[in-house]
């Protein structure tokens, strides 16, 4: 797919180290983003990043070396560095040499695209954003407004001493809308039109993300929130829209189920997990209605791929089925350490970071309820949309989330807006109180572009798809509490 990366790979074979095993992951990332804020075009962002990560297994040691110098001299230096680190770590290795995954497959994969980024000229993209800005500025109480549109293309070539040659090309589209309203000391804002909803694909994805059509409704909601009541307080029913469900899934299912975290790798940085290895196969994580899948094969979703960064074929697996914990989010190396099955989720954030266990596409499967059915069953509760803030303890168990918008539910009907809606809970209790799961009609594909993990930090794309969901007996409160 990428002639230059293939040229570098062919040259590397002639200087590859004579060790038990090696892999090299070559990356070429191109990124462009444009933004119009308050009717003024901002500087166009362009980025081109290219480099390689070499992994060497020698004895029971494993060493890495990353380089942006893909010349013969740069590659030879990387070979020396990785081999030296492998030698030094041999006595401290977590795995035996035979336990490292050794992919042999030859394959290609590319994100399906119907309308490529370059098919729409820059001036037309800017005009689209200018029109969105006009639609956002509905009156003087809108004090800040912005529309943005970004594209990223990653070419990745993975080769190994066992003969693997895996080429993958990913296309990402990232739009968004922001409206900020102010009255006196009160400020409210709404985001949407693709914010927290990035996808793989081309410009054809914009319609799926309601971009830029959502501009005026978002601005109207931001203004309306200025005169809304504060969110009520107490234990009550809670209906979460997909725009909030994605953070709930991410923080209280995704991170605690990452196998390297369960094994202790994140303890000194981002904490551990309340989940332990003996829970898998028997632990009730949620009610019978909770079904969660790892699904890297949904092509429009943000973290879809054919092979992970250890060369493992990616396939759909149940992580939680009928509420029971099935398997962790652990790639082949972590699986070997733990002696248990996982998924193909060893992922690199960039060419200069080694692969670690990351969420990819982690989805709540649809149920059989319409949103109207769920709301009609609520005597007293709140409906919430779009994450605004989050806090979770270092074992990924207790949490607190704030949302941009809420609506009171009384006697089965949606009533007026409420501002500053928040809720909190404990993961197991919360998911066991899942009493309704939306059907396909409310199912939405969304994603997170800033998932952080690892030390040094790695920021990576993660996909979440989910319907609206209904929970009982949730601790809900407003900003005054």
Image (cartoon, rainbow, N blue to C red):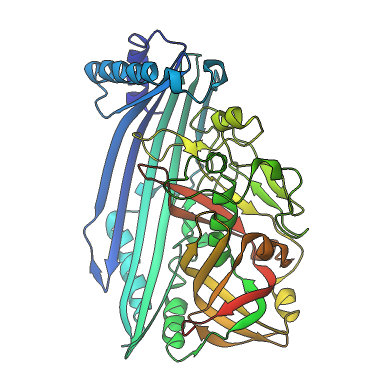
- Left or right? Give the position of 312 relative to 189: right
Q: Is residue 434 left or right of residue 449?
A: right
Whether residue 308 is visible to the viewer of this picture, yes or no, is yes
Task: Classify 121 as above or below 431.
Answer: above
Image label count? 0
Return the residue nearer the eye: 480 or 22: 480
Which residue does the image show at 69% across and 61% down from the upper left? 440
Q: Position of residue 450 (x, y in %)?
A: 41, 53
Along the line of sight, which residue is nearer the eye, 41 or 188? Answer: 188
In which quadrant of the rendered view does residue 412 lie?
Answer: bottom right
Q: Quadrant of the N terminus?
A: top left
Quarter of the rendering containing residue 15: top left
* Residue 158, image x, y percentages: 44, 25
Q: Position of residue 21 (x, y in %)?
A: 46, 14
Which residue sits at x=42%, y=88%?
226
What percent of the width, then of the height, locates residue 215? 42, 74
Picture residue at 29% right of the left edge, 58% below the top: 34
Q: Is residue 465 above or below residue 179?
A: above
Q: Can you see residue 201?
A: no
Is 415 drawn above or below residue 57 in the view shown? below
| Residue in view at x 50 percent, y 55 percent | 394
- Relative to 12, say whether 136 is above or below: below
Residue nearest the observer in this picture, 357 or 417: 357
């Amino acid at each position: 797919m990428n002639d230059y990366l293939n040229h570098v790979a062919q040259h590397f074979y002639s200087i590859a180290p004579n060790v038990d095993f090696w892999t090299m992951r070559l990356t070429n990332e191109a990124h462009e983003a444009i933004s119009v804020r308050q009717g003024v075009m901002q500087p166009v962002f362009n980025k081109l990043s290219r480099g390689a990560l070499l992994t060497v297994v020698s004895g029971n040691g494993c060493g890495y070396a990353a380089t942006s110098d893909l010349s013969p001299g740069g590659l030879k230096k990387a070979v020396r560095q990785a081999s030296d680190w492998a030698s030094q770590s041999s006595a401290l290795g977590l795995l035996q040499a035979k336990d490292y995954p050794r992919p042999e497959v030859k394959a290609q994969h590319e994100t399906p695209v119907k309308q490529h980024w370059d098919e729409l000229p820059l001036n037309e993209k800017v005009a689209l954003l200018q029109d969105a800005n006009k639609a956002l500025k509905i009156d003087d109480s809108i004090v800040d407004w912005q529309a943005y549109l970004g594209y990223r293309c990653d070419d990745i070539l993975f080769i190994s001493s066992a003969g693997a040659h895996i080429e993958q090309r990913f296309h990402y589209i990232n739009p968004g809308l922001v409206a900020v309203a102010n009255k006196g000391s009160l400020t409210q804002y709404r985001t949407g039109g693709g914010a927290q909803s990035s996808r793989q694909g081309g410009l054809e994805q914009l319609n799926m993300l309601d971009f830029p059509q959502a501009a005026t409704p978002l601005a109207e909601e931001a203004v309306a929130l200025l005169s809304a009541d504060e969110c009520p307080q107490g234990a009550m029913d809670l209906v979460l829209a997909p725009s909030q469900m994605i953070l709930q899934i991410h923080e209280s299912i995704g991170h605690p189920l990452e196998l390297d975290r369960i094994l202790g790798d994140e303890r000194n940085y981002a904490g551990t997990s309340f989940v332990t290895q003996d829970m898998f196969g028997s632990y009730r994580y949620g009610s019978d209605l909770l079904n969660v899948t790892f699904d890297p094969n949904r092509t429009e979703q943000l973290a879809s791929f054919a092979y992970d960064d250890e060369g493992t074929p990616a396939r759909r697996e149940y992580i939680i089925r009928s509420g029971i914990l099935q398997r962790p989010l652990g790639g082949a190396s972590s699986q070997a350490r733990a002696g248990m099955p996982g998924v193909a989720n060893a992922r690199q954030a960039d060419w200069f970071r080694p692969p670690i266990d990351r969420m990819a596409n982690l989805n709540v499967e649809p149920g059989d309820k319409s949103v109207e059915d769920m709301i009609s069953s609520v005597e007293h509760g709140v409906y919430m949309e779009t994450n605004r803030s989050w806090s979770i303890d270092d074992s990924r168990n207790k949490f607190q989330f704030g949302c941009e918008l809420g609506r009171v539910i009384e006697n089965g009907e949606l009533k007026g807006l409420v501002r500053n809606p928040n809720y909190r809970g404990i993961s197991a209790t919360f998911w066991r109180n899942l009493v309704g799961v939306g059907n396909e009609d409310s199912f939405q594909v969304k994603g997170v572009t800033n998932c952080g993990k690892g030390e040094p930090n790695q920021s990576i794309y993660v996909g979440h798809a989910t319907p609206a969901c209904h929970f009982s007996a949730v601790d809900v409160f407003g900003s005054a509490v």
